[in-house]
Amino acid sequence: MSVASPHHRSTVMPTPRQQMMAQLEHGSLLVGGRELLARAPPNVTLRPAGVADAEAAPGTAFLGARAAEPSSRHVFSVGTLASGWRWMSLFRFKIWWMAPATGAGAAAVPAETQMLLLESRDEAGSAAAEGSAVYALMLPVLDGDFRASLQGSPQNELQFCFESGDPDVQTMEAVDAVFINSGDNPFKLMKESIKLLSKIKGTFRHIEDKEIPANLDWFGWCTWDAFYKAVNPAGIEEGIQSLHEGGAPPRFLIIDDGWQETVDEFKEVDETLREQTVFAQRLIDLKENHKFRGETCKNLGNLVKKIKEKHGVKFVYMWHALLGYWGGVLATSDAMKKYNPKLAYPVQSPGNVANLRDIAIDSLEKFGVGIIDPDKIYEFYNDQHSYLSSVGVDGVKVDVQNVLETLVHGFGGRVAVTRKYQHALEDSIAQNFKRNNLICCMSHNSDSIFSALKSAVARASEDFMPREPTLQTLHIGYVAFNSILLGEIFIPDWDMFLSKHETAEFHGAARALSGGGVYVSDKPGVHDFSVLKKLVLPDGSILRARYAGRPTRDCLFNDPVMDGKSLLKIWNLNNSSGVIGAFNCQGAGQWVWPVKDIAYVPTSINITDHLSPSDVESLDEIAGDNWSGETAVYAFNSCSLSRLQKHQNLEVSLSTMACEIYTISPIKVFSKAIQFAPLGLINMFNSGGALNDVSSTSDSSATTIHVRCRGPGRFGAYSATRPELCRVDGQQVEFSHTEDGLLAFDLPHCSSHDGDLWRIEILYRIP
């Protein structure tokens, strides 16, 4: 009789449930039935993720580790990445913002990685083969008073950093530091993981459990690039009026930096230091500065009242920093003394300075920040927001949030302080404003992300920078990839852009797919309405897609900016159709890491790739029962219509900084004979966003398809056969029907029924 050795592996095949289980045995971490980590040290632990409904997610677990001595910062190795995996990282390339990186092997995983998505394919598996891939998700999270992040080492080890940010807050053990999950669909994996984590941790909520601000459905204007800090009441009125007169009325306004009462304590410094002190100014009062108090504008309330009543603005937001202003508050100011402020000097984590330093944090490290006592922070926010609300302001954009993680010595650490500030901010918003009107900005640390109980909107990337030509394509890459994580917790805000700019079409098309707000920062009178009218209806509303725009599955592990061969494809869903934007981001810029002294020279690169209706995830979700898999695909710029099965491909060829948007509409069969797919307003970037619903009625002689659609504009649909007639709100209209099946007619400028929805009837005679 033979005796099995301790390392003998049974030949009994594991059950499907056992294959899904995350297991750590003999230094090997298995997820989804495949080895993810090898040679994990003995101090590494794995604990099943425990909630009441964990039965529904058997593959979830937390990685942890134990140290020999307590410390406020640990770096634990968890082993090497097993062969056959490639990864996509979302990491903080500077203290404020995340960016994507891709690779294989642990050594190249950047410091401050806050999400690591990995893919392993069968040897015969291809990118198009469903079921051939296993995806693993590693999310470093918050564990008690500590926060985790991932990084690689020169020894090709994957590590997690575990830190409190306060030397007085120490531990020997990380228990629930890195969340692990796996699945065969990366987008479902992200959604299910974030939902489960929100239940386990209880410190944040999934976006589906939050109130969505109403301003997101309206076109906006931000004063920043129009005026920078020189913003003033006359300029604000002029900018709103010029947009209104051109047919793109802004219903949402952000009055950005420049309205507050601040002081520059360093104006007498040597001229060589002036650039460094620009971020060290401090707030001295909660009310508006002298520019908003005078003969033409008595006060902020007078301005807000005027722009709402005279110009039809529905929502006014004011900008402020999390700590009041960039340099915090002036501790000696009479108005600020009640909040017990003190001057503190930022101390950055080694992870922050491992990538790119930032001029703003360098300035604050030198000149300090006036930080409010955490026990007084709700009072501070409530005082400011109650004043703004009293003068008609509807909400706030809160900037410079991540600086807080560097100012927590003596307050209990970065996690505890961030959570206290974030929840105080959210409570003040709920107390003083309607509809959860808050935009979080410069908030890409996991401390803030995983403390967002109510916050529903967050900026998705570094600023749009109109004077930096090599950053334009990077911006689109940032926002799309960052939305993979952020889009499960927030509506990602892809930032403002300029409508009159060499990249306006490129940026405008991306904003149409973002699922978030659409707003510009044009100077008054400097607009391109041919771009704006592809985004904005005459009433000032926009056609917002249902989810956060994200890269298609076949783009997740490519480099759409630097590999010289990949297009960036971004997908989203509307009520009755999907949408894909194809963007050539190659040649026009380079990722800003590693830092190089050599100036980058943009070049033009033509990229040919393929696009498929199956690139739209969850298309079945809107196609309904008995869908055959056939789709109508309409290309916005070329105005071409194709009929494709779900897994068929369409060739796409684009030059640098060019883009194309494709509406993907499932073809449905009505009365067993009428093949029809609505496209929406085909003169708009996101045409399908105009569609509300589609239905049909039939009798023995005719079938009528009923569509409710917003307008005005050119309505389009795929129709295999020519209809007998088309009506809009009961009135017969002229229509065209081409050989490729494109049915089109105009929707007028005003509707008399159902608010802003036209009632469309398309009648087919049954022979």
Image (cartoon, rainbow, N blue to C red):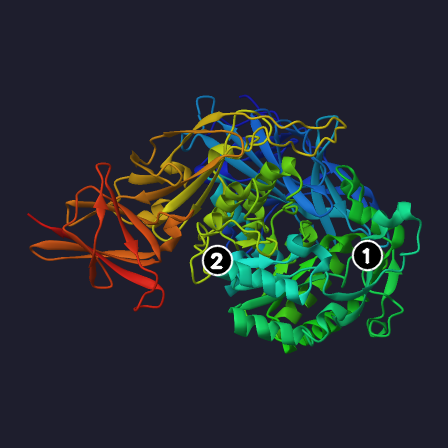
Say whether marks 2 and 1 touch (CB < 8 Å): no
> In the drawing, what numbered circle is on residue 248?
2
| Figure quadrant of residue 652 | top left
Q: Which of marks 2 and 1 is nearer the N terminus?
A: 2
Query: Element type at marker 1?
Result: loop
Amino acid type, residue under disc 2 in the picture: Ala
Measuring from the top left, give residue 565's x and y in whole percent. 52, 25
Q: Residue at x 37, y 43 (%)?
A: 663
Quick check: 416 above or below 606? below
Q: How crowded is mark 2: few (under 14 residues within 10 Å), some or many (20 or more)?
A: many
Q: Which residue is drawn at 44% across and 49% down?
A: 534
| Figure quadrant of residue 563 | top right
Amino acid type, residue under disc 1 in the picture: Val
Measuring from the top left, give residue 415's x and y in whole percent. 73, 55
Q: Mark 1 points at which residue?
A: 408
Q: Residues within 10 Å of mark 1 (few under 14, many from 20)?
A: many
Query: Element type at marker 2?
Result: loop
Quick check: 421 above or below 67? below
Quick check: 652 above or below 114? above
Measuring from the top left, give residue 166's x and y in whole percent. 83, 53
* Closer to viewer: mark 2 or mark 1: 2
